Image (tube, grey):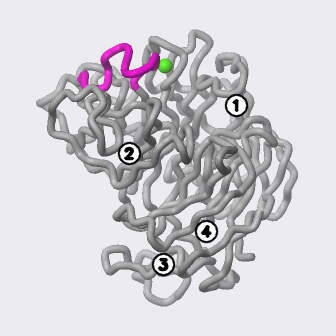
């Protein structure tokens, strides 16, 4: 399971080092009381290996932290539960079970079920978190739950407030990850609805919530909806749907924000040939199905934003997007985007690229597990979930 560090990454000036490994160059006026890197030994030039956080979870498809200082690691199980590991304790505990609300998941490769969760930025005080699942009709649901005692309690299933429902024409390409941005808005990634080659014509259709990253305000419902529209969303007054933030996606199973820069990194799962990584901004059209990766797919025309990276199906089959490393431990991995692919062959990859898609001086390793999701702990250390074995791992120095 050990990986080989090929060479250390020299950071460009565009991606300054996170403050935490050095510990003294943050803006003190906005620092939390406790430095999250206190007690962590930073290393440079170390090889990476994976260390088990805990096992005994079933089909992990999302890994999140609550950002509340508890250092708990929460795991979404595809069949409808949220489990968690307490800091330093490898016992998987059940936190929420919404299996009755979530469609029954079939065999390997089934894209339905409980897909993702996101903690409200004020979870520590308001106990609110958000989930993305496919209901018993296999339609998309985004819902809010509340736990009365965020530090120690368990949420009540009855606390559900459904925020958004979107009809799904097929069982695949349901999207996945949801995250709060640094602006406090909730972003939701949805796929093109399914089939193959954009069967339902949603990729370039501005009049559907599918095939997009949506941006909504869950704290201020308005206009008869369970959410509000941020006033600076890019298509207000232009496109039919004010929720649209980025469009032209095929299936953004995993995407994330760089916790330092706020950049949006999207891993868009490909059709039969190419997997792509995009760094997207408000209003970007990523081109599906006119384009896939840097190449023409349907060949239709438009004003499209190119990805930063693509790879072919000789190297993987379905990209599992990850996170830009901003942890406390590896000083020389700062700013690298780590990702994987849902396959064992030709390897079970853990790869990284730089912010500009450079693969010259980055990690490339075979971790030997089936990675459907990655995550970050509260310190920004990168986590990986083994879908097949139900175990969660952390990247640590060898
Ligand atoms: Ca679908």
Closer to us: mark 1 or mark 3? 3
Res. 210 image quadrant: top left
Closer to us: mark 2 or mark 1? 2
Q: Which residue is mark 4?
A: 379
Mark-to-mark CA distance, 4 and 2: 22 Å
Write down the region rendered in magenta.
Answer: 192-205
In the image, farthest residue toward the left: 238
Magenta stretch: residue 197 in it? yes
Majority secondary structure in the magenta region: loop
Secondary structure type for disc 4: loop
In the displayed structure image, the side of residue 299 where residue 327 appears, left or right? right
Mark-to-mark CA distance, 3 and 4: 20 Å
Res. 148 image quadrant: top right
Indicate the quadrant containing the C terminus: top left, top right, bottom left or bottom right.
bottom right
Kindly identify the residue that appears in the image at 83 percent across and 46 percent down.
Answer: 92
Of the numbered discs 2 and 3, the one sitting upstream in the chain is 3
Position of residue 270 measured from the top left corner of the image (x, y, whole percent)? 44, 35
Kindly identify the residue that appears in the image at 82 percent across and 64 percent down.
Answer: 88
């Amino acid at each position: 399971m050990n990986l080989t560090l090929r060479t250390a990454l020299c950071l460009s000036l565009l991606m300054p080092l996170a403050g935490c490994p050095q510990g003294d160059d943050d803006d003190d006026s906005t620092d939390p009381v406790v430095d999250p890197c206190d007690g962590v030994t930073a290393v440079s030039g170390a090889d990476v290996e994976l260390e088990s956080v805990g096992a005994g979870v079933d089909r992990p498809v999302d890994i999140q932290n609550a950002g509340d200082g508890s250092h708990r690691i929460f795991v979404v199980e595809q069949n409808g539960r949220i489990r968690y590991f307490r800091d330093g304790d490898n016992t998987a505990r059940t936190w929420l079970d919404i299996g009755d609300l979530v469609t029954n998941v079939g065999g390997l490769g089934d894209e339905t079920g409980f897909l993702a969760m996101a903690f409200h930025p004020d979870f520590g005080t308001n106990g609110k978190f958000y989930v993305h699942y496919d209901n018993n009709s296999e339609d998309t649901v985004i819902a809010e739950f509340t736990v009365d005692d965020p530090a120690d309690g368990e949420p009540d299933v009855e606390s559900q407030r459904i925020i958004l429902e979107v009809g799904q024409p097929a069982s695949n390409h349901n999207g996945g990850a949801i995250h709060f941005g640094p602006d406090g808005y909730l972003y939701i990634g949805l796929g093109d609805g399914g089939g193959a080659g954009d069967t339902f014509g949603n990729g370039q259709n501005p009049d559907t919530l599918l095939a997009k990253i949506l941006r909504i305000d869950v704290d201020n419902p308005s206009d008869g909806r369970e959410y509000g529209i941020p006033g600076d969303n890019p298509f207000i007054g232009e496109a039919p749907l004010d929720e649209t933030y980025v469009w032209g996606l095929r299936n953004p199973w995993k995407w994330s924000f760089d916790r330092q820069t706020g950049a949006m990194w999207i891993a868009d799962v490909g059709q039969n040939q190419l997997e792509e990584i995009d760094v997207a901004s408000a209003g970007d059209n990523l081109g599906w199905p006119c384009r896939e990766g840097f190449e023409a797919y349907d060949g239709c025309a438009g004003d499209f934003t190119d990805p930063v990276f693509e790879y072919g199906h000789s190297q993987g089959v379905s990209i599992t997007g990850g996170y830009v490393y901003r942890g406390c431990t590896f000083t020389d991995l700062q700013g690298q985007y780590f990702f994987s692919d849902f396959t064992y062959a030709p390897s079970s990859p853990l790869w990284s690229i730089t912010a500009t898609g450079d693969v010259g001086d980055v990690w490339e390793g075979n971790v030997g597990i089936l990675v459907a999701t990655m995550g970050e702990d509260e310190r920004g250390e990168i986590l990986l979930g083994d879908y097949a074995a139900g175990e969660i791992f952390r990247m640590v120095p060898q």
